[in-house]
């Protein structure tokens, strides 16, 4: 089987985008129209890893790489950037952000044999990123939260917003204080529910979730991972409930919630 290279992939992308002989679908796309596909491919990569489906992960990573190639081709067409500048900028940034590996700032430099802790690496990383943000201020980006991507999933963006605010001292000192804040938000949510104010309910529900993300951050838990794990657990347990219903030969509407809940408890006892 022939082994293709990154140069072949770039050539293929150019062919797909050829205005006369390319693929009509690919030709009509622009940066904005490709974004939903990029997000979908990223989630499919995450899903394959979560399922430890290594065979399909290979394919999903290829699909995600194709998204980068697509953007590079469109950037080249607009004379804004191309694949080579994407790679060059990435290498330059990673060398700059890893001084413990590339001490003199060049790709060929060797690291010191003196060990460095993960905590020190993290401090250095944050200090370098802060320097980069300060440099951006000279180009008109001055607000603390300005470059937190808006297209991130809600929970992930909440974490990044909170971490960024924490860097300038706007943060709770301990998890217990966040728990108190959650109690406050829960009380406000109850009031909104009692009033039947849908707009206020949505607002307070958002505050409650934001506070939960804050607690997860203080406890060292990634909220996206936590929810993903809970989703998988719910799916396993609900599948057991469905198996019990199907085995009975009775339709769903003939079961009481209590009966269905007993099947759920069985799933928990089985460690599902």
Image: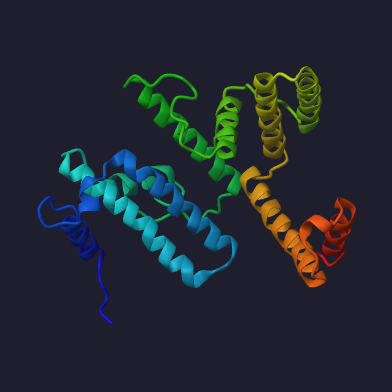
What residue is drawn where x is 32% and y is 57%?
66
239 on left or right of 152: right
* Outermost bottom residue: 1
Question: Front-most of 37 and 254?
Answer: 254
Please say whether residue 108 is visible from this viewpoint: no
Please say whether residue 192 is visible from this viewpoint: yes
100 on left or right of 204: left
What residue is drawn where x is 79% and y is 30%?
179
Residue 113, how many percent across, how many down?
49, 57
Looking at the picture, the colour scheme in use is: rainbow
60 on left or right of 118: left
Question: Front-most of 88 and 265?
Answer: 265
Residue 153, how many percent across, how many down?
53, 40
Residue 219, how many percent across, how many down?
73, 40
What residue is drawn where x is 39% and y is 56%?
64
Vertical order, 79 against 239 (above or below): above
* Outermost left residue: 20
Question: Front-most of 229 and 267?
Answer: 267
Which image quarter is the C terminus in?
bottom right
């Amino acid at each position: 089987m022939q082994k293709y290279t990154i140069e072949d992939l770039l050539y293929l992308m150019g062919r797909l985008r050829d205005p006369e002989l390319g693929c009509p679908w690919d030709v009509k796309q622009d940066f904005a129209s490709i974004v939903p596909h990029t997000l979908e491919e990223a989630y499919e990569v995450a899903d394959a890893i979560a399922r430890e489906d290594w065979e399909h992960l290979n394919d999903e990573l290829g699909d995600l790489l194709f998204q980068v190639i697509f953007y590079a081709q469109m950037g080249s067409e607009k004379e804004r950037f191309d694949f080579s500048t994407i790679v060059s900028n990435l290498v330059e940034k990673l060398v700059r952000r890893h001084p413990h590996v590339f001490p003199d700032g060049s790709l060929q430099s060797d690291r010191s044999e003196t060990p460095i802790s993960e905590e020190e690496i993290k401090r250095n990383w944050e200090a370098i990123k802060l320097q980069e943000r300060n440099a951006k201020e000279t180009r008109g980006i001055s607000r603390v939260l300005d470059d937190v991507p808006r297209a991130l999933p809600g929970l992930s963006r909440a974490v990044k917003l909170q971490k960024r605010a924490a860097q300038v001292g706007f943060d709770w000192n301990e998890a217990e204080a966040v728990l108190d804040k959650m109690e406050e938000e829960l009380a406000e949510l109850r009031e909104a529910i009692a009033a039947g104010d849908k707009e206020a309910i949505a607002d307070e529900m958002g505050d409650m979730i934001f506070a939960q993300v804050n607690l997860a951050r203080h406890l060292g838990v990634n909220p996206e991972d936590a929810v993903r794990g809970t989703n998988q657990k719910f799916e396993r347990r609900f599948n057991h409930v469905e198996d019990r219903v199907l085995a009975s030969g009775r339709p769903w509407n003939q079961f009481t919630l209590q009966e269905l809940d007993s099947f759920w408890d069985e799933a928990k006892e089985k460690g599902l």
